[in-house]
Image (cartoon, rainbow, N blue to C red):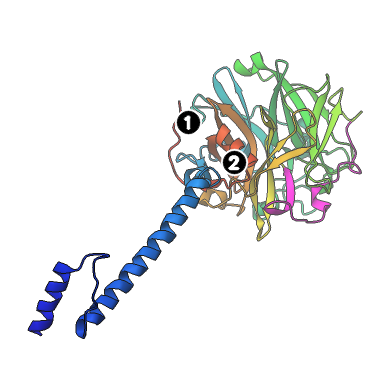
Amino acid sequence: MVVIKKTKKIIKKKIEPKKIKSKPVGAVKKVIKKDSLKKSIKKTAKKVVKKSLSKKILNKKKIPKKKELEVKLVRSIKNPILKPRIYSWESQAVFNPAAIYSGGRIHLFYRALGGDGISRFGYASSKDGINFDERLYYPVFSYKEAEEMKNHWPYTSPVGPAYNTNLYGSGGGWGGCEDPRAVFIDGDIYLTFNIFDMANGWRWDSMRVAVVSINEKDLLNKKWRWKNFSYLSHKGDRQKNWVLFPEKFNGKFAIFNNLDKGDPDRVFVSYVNNLDTTETPTIKDAPDPQVLPDHIVAWHKRTRSAASPPIKTKDGWLLLYHAMDKSDGDRYKLGAMLLDLKDPSKVIYRAQNPILEPDEWYENDWKPGIIYANGSVVKNGRLFVYYGGGDKYVGVASIVLSDLIKNIKENKEVKLEKNKKINIK
């Protein structure tokens, strides 16, 4: 034992690379073989690492950085930003808000549901887009036929439009105006919405799309002088969720009618001189999404409807939309696409994953698995998306607009980030 230790010391002291001429014998020979083997392995490993590193350096520009893959849509920690209140007309639910930016404030027109099962529009506004410090205690728009309906049908009637809270989860109230979207065109705010046409009695298939407008000055002064009410969809055609583009094309209004034309690269847009039924498409040309077959496009298997009205960017019209996932078919999720600026029926880019999913408690409290984003506004370069959660609350999520556009164009994932504070400038 002593000799071996001594020999090791001598070897350790005298052996130098490339200067050994004689081979040690006995136990020392085994030590050198092991040592040589280790050196050989290390040398080979260094070559592999060096080669690998050189490849990474050469392909550095092609490899996406981790941070680029982590651009996320952020929910406000204040969510839900609007909840039902004690007033009878909004005691059951407040959800699916339209949004418009005017006079340095963000204005919401939200769908409110009362104990009578009638949907009306309430109003709230905010300077920063998160804290809504102004909210009226009365509805700002209530369709007159909804009021007439209450006088003609008893609430307890099993065949009439009686409101039953136990059936609320199947689709909403029994009448009135629903799911507004707002755009600003030529000094007026136009509100499109879904409405039950009560002319021939209440039926689920009587759902139509209508429009009404208000001057911007009246909005800012809280003078609810609505004008130019008209139906956009035809009588007898069950239609929902048509939205206006916020500018005219060659002097005509542009209406986004349908997400699904059987071609993933095309959507259906119509152009009309007047906002009425004289030139709008029938259900034959713009079929109800409920009756269309499922087919896989990007991340989803079923397209539902446009969400908020399109937003113009230098890269195209940004359209948010609702759809069902291929592997999660019971939940409404939010998708995003870019449409061609000159021909908005052409899809030029599409996000390859949902940008918002119903994972929070307030998105599952009443009707589970619902994200319904009727309003979006760009403020200081940031996109604010206002949505109904669970058909009961109003929430907001945001993202830097340029980050979202970049990720859509590069087909990268945009994932949800939970409960992070939104920095408002």
Amino acid type, callout 1: Asn
For image coordinates 60% across by 40% down, the residue present is: 387
According to the image, label 1 marks what residue?
A: 131
Amino acid type, callout 2: Asn
- Crowding at dot 2, Cα within 10 Å, few <14 / some 14-19 / many 20+, comes out as many
Is label 1 or label 2 in front? 2
> Quick one: which residue is furthest to the front in this view?
21
Q: Secondary structure at mark 1?
A: loop
Magenta region, residue range: 280-305
Q: Is residue 78 above or below residue 5?
A: above
Magenta stretch mostly in which secondary structure?
loop
Q: Quadrant of the C terminus?
A: top left
Q: Quadrant of the N terminus?
A: bottom left
For image coordinates 50% across by 30% down, the residue present is: 132
Horizontal side of residue 269 vs 349, given as left or right:
right
Query: Which mark is drawn over residue 78?
Result: none
Task: Specify which label sits upstream in the sequence, 1 or 2.
Answer: 1
Asked whether residue 113 appears in the rendered view, the answer is no
Depth order, front residue of 132/260: 260
For image coordinates 46% across by 50% down, the residue present is: 54
Depth order, front residue of 6/221: 6
Structural distance between the alpha carbons of marks 1 and 2:
28 Å
Image location of residue 196, percent across then percent down: 79, 40
Number of labels in the image equals 2
Horizontal side of residue 69 vs 273, given as left or right:
left
Horizontal side of residue 311 vs 237, given as left or right:
left
Image location of residue 88, percent across then percent down: 60, 38
Image location of residue 222, percent across then percent down: 61, 18
According to the image, label 2 marks what residue?
A: 407
Is 140 magenta? The answer is: no
